[in-house]
Image: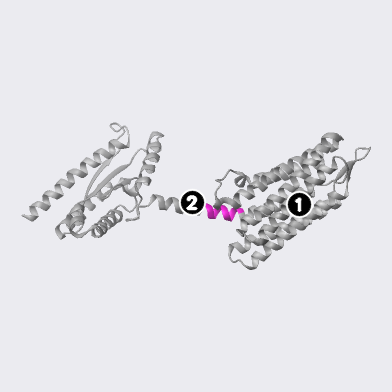
Amino acid sequence: MYYASIGIIAMIVMVIINIEALRKVENTSGNDARLKYRQYLFSLIAFFSADVLWGFFYEQRWVVVTYIDTCLFFGFMVLSVLFWTRGVVAFSGDKGKLSKLLVAGGWAVFTFEMVVLTVNLFVPVVFSFSDDKEYLPRPARYIGLILQMILFLITSVYSMVRVTRSEGISRSHYRTISISGLIMSFFIVVQMFFPLMPFYSMGCLFGTCLIHTFIYKDKDVAYNKEILVAKQRAYNDGLTNVKNKLAYLEALAELEIAVANGEITEFGVVVFDVNGLKMINDTFGHEAGDEHIKSACKIICRKFEHSPVFRVGGDEFVALLKGDDYANREELIRSFREIIDENLKNGSVVVASGLAIYDASIDDNYNDVFKRADKFMYERKQELKSVTSSMAL
């Protein structure tokens, strides 16, 4: 079980380290390198499995199943080599002749092994078993391993050339791929001289550990940053740069879950509506209207700076109050209305506002709180209009 034990340990460690890389990813052009690397990892798992079983079957001297498993062993081995070359090319993004030749080399090694394994069914050119049930390597085995070693060396050189043409983190990534190719070449040579030791599996383990540590984690971080940036763009209002209605709806869903679970027992809602926007649009144009909305948003955000502010309509905003802003809500709304009263006198931006807080004894859901806040906002809007009318007189 010594041989099998090493293979089992190698496979377990590789799977644990690469668990994220093994998860399913979308089949898009941007994910091509991730998909190819995932294929490579799965081919290695298949190879490790065959390697582990080989150690167990051979120890039991079950010649028939050992023979079958040996064929699978070599088949999955060259399949992993093919996926390795495809992965290196996909990572580089190169579509030139050299990359095509590299992939063609992977197919050539794979095809050679499949042919000699087929021939081996009739003439033992790859391996055989003696009358004493001892495993005997044959010339084609060494030729196959030498071809694999050459291919790994070529990918190593290919990657090192990319190092000279790259900079920053990409330079480090290509260097890692080059070193991984050299490691595999070394362990293939050792495997040729020690056929009854799982050196090839050890090389695969070391290579994938390097790639995970110095490449995949960087790529994963970069990928997550791209997702975060895209998500932020999707959730931000293009005009005011506060959160938009999509973000508002998601925040409401999270809030209602937190309230239902008892995680949040206190929150407030402030509804805002910008006065006079239609008149400004009709008189001065929509560009002036947009500037008016941005000015109103700045006033809201400055006063409620510790609360998320959402633009939920053309001239409508909502702030969700929690924590310190909830505790200081009365002072905040009073101060905000004083600013608006002063703006009204100066002919500046006027924003109506209404505040309501969650009361578990009367509110079944968030919408009940919002309706009260909206009602208070409307009353404030009418009040401001009345003041405006009296000032005009």
Label 2 near label 1: C-beta < 8 Å? no
Circle 2 crowding by C-alpha within 10 Å: few under 14, some 14–19, many from 20:
few
Circle 1 is placed at which residue position?
109
Is 19 on the left or on the right of 137, as rendered?
left
Q: Where is residue 60 in the image (x, y as percent from the top left)?
A: 85, 34
Q: Where is residue 324 in the image (x, y as percent from the top left)?
A: 34, 48
Residue at 86% over, 52% down: 193
Q: Could you say which is closer to the camera, residue 113 or residue 379?
A: 113
Q: State whether residue 272 is above or below residue 93.
A: above
Q: Residue 227 carries which label?
A: 2
Q: How far apart are marks 1 and 2 (CA)?
A: 38 Å
* Amino acid type assigned to the residue bearing label 1 in the image: Val
Identify the residue at the far right of this view.
131
Q: How many labels does the image show?
A: 2
Secondary structure state at the residue bearing disc 2:
helix
Residue at 58% over, 56% down: 218
